[in-house]
Image: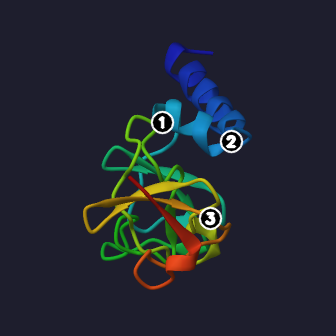
Amino acid sequence: MGLIEEARRMRSFIEQMATSLDDETAEQHIDVFPSWEVGRFYETDFRVRYNGVLYKVLQEHTSQADWTPDVAVSLYVKCHKQDPGEEYPEWVQPTGGHDAYNKGDKVTFEGKHYESLIDANVWSPKDYPQGWQEIE
């Protein structure tokens, strides 16, 4: 077997093994995941790289140029919502339970810091203040 064939075989094995990683570990090894491509069929829970971010497929589909992972929120979700180096990232509207905030998650909303008091929190601190505690 030639060097190129062996590299292809190893790449396939690495990609297959990467499917068993949890999202946080997977994000630390983003280079082992394939880049997002137009016209490719994606199965649910498959992970792809797009613009340096790792995304998980939420529902089976064949990708289209206007359905990129950063804009097609019904098809993809970032694997790890919070940057571990950023204590209070900017609040982002969850699109459903798959990317909702959980108890203890911290955010910045309208210039103030908050911590979620509940799991599956899809509301902003303004829309459901009972679900958040302001941190001073």
Residue 25: give x, y in percent of width and height: 61, 34
Residue depicted at x 45% and y 71% = 63
Q: Nearer the viewer, mark 1 or mark 2?
A: 2
Q: Is residue 25 left or right of residue 29?
A: right
Q: Which residue is mark 1?
A: 30
Q: Which residue is mark 2?
A: 22
Q: Which residue appears farthest toward the left when viewing the image?
A: 111
Cα–Cα span, label 1 and label 2: 12 Å
* Amino acid type of the residue that numbered disc 1 sits on in the rendered structure: Ile
Q: Secondary structure at mark 1?
A: helix
* Amino acid type of the residue that numbered disc 2 sits on in the rendered structure: Asp
- In primary-sequence order, the first of circles 3 and 1 is 1
Cα–Cα span, label 3 and label 1: 31 Å
Residue depicted at x 31% and y 72% = 65
Please identify the quarter of the rendering in which residue 5 is found.
top right
Structural crowding at the residue carrying mark 2, measured as other residues with C-alpha within 10 Å and reported as few (<14), some (14–19) or many (≥20):
few
